[in-house]
Amino acid sequence: MEMIVNKNELFDEVLLRPAKEADSLIIVSGFATSAMVEYQISSIRKKLGKEIAIELLVGMTPIHGVSEIHHRNFIKLHKEIDFNCSYISSQYPAVHSKLYVWRKDNRPVKAFLSTANYTVTGFLKNQRELGIECNSTEALEYYQSLLQHSLYCHCDEAEEYVTVNAPIFSSDDPNKSQLYPSKESVCLPLFSEKTGKMHNRAGLNWGQREGRNPNQAYIHIPKELRSFFPDRGQPFSVLTNDGFPFVCVVAQDEGKAIETTYNNSEFGEYFRNKLGLELGKKVELEDLDEFGSRYVKFTKIDEEEYYMEYERGINFSDNQ
């Protein structure tokens, strides 16, 4: 039964191919990211044409807590797809194990132990990881033994027993400074810098055409700033400064756009609400100017986490 899986085959062998014969996946991982959930789900949809259920248990939360960016997105994913996420409570020892158990009709059918955390970095980036097939019944029993020490991410007590790490401390507290003051930031235009006008059927107005949801939108990435974001097709997690979570992806020709993965209307709805516009209404340049900014700011926390701010006074000069 034992089979060592090397890095170049790890995602396909552990997280993709078993879905052909299974309908659900149980994961125990020291660390995990919401972008990885989206990447796996979308890969299975695209390559196998099916849906699976995922139950994720994040184990290192008693020591490291959980990033607010991923926490908010885990809750959002729970509402949108067949996905549950649990954290080991701070009252119990941390769990560093990485275990992947596939089930069919609630019966374990295949399982893997791996060195890779359930993250895009762990499975898709150039670092040395491996996996080995293990006894699926014993693996499921191990997962079940941990459940009594965990809390669902969406339950009322989650933030009481698990530390949620905010990307940036509240700016209205003079005794606190930025948690990530040295992180790089870029400002992306919400209008056409080339013409000085608002896009008619692109950007925030991408959906302003017959047969489309009028709220569909994307954020344009100028060519000189594309290296700031992940590679095209790789999901990443975003949290806004006012608490809205998104899972996004770099998309379109030459990776020129940031889109939301679950629903292309999410950005359009967010910005229209910020601008005080009715949903579905075309966004005009005057709307941005009345709000006080033609640019949106992204701060890179790491390869899978970004912080987004759209507030009065954000300007292209912040890129200098």
Image (spheres, grey):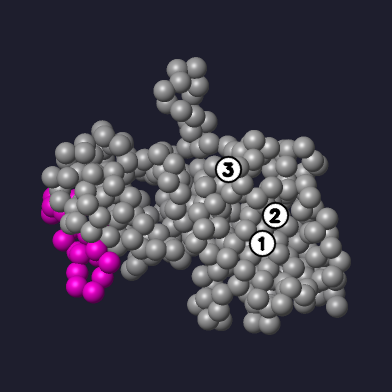
Q: Is residue 127 left or right of residue 40?
A: right
Cα–Cα span, label 2 and label 3: 15 Å
Mark 2 vs 1: CB contact within 8 A: yes
Query: Is 15 in the magenta?
Result: no
Relative depth, front residue between 104 and 7: 104
Sequence-first disc among 3 and 1: 1
Q: Nearer the viewer, mark 3 or mark 1?
A: 1
Residue 57's disc number: 2
Inspect the image, locate mark 2, and give the three-letter code of the amino acid beneath it: Leu
Q: CA distance from mark 3 to mark 1?
A: 19 Å
Q: Quadrant of the rendered structure where residue 266 is?
A: bottom left
Q: Reply yes or no: does residue 208 show up in magenta.
A: yes
State the residue position of label 3: 67
Name the image quarter holding the C terminus: top left
Q: Nearer the viewer, mark 2 or mark 3?
A: 2
Callout 2–callout 3 Cβ contact below 8 Å: no
Residue 145's spot in the image, x, y percent?
83, 55
For disc 2, the neighbor class at 10 Å (few under 14, some 14 to 19, many from 20) is: many
- Residue 108 percent location from the top left of the image: 78, 73
Numbered disc 2: secondary structure: strand
- Mark 1 closeness class: few <14, some 14–19, many ≥20 residues within 10 Å: some
At x 46%, y 20%, the residue is: 173
Q: Three-letter amino acid code at disc 3?
A: Ser
Q: Which residues are magenta?
A: 192-214
Quadrant location, the N terminus: bottom right
Residue 55: mark in rendering: 1
Left/right of residue 100 with respect to residue 176 in the rendered view: right
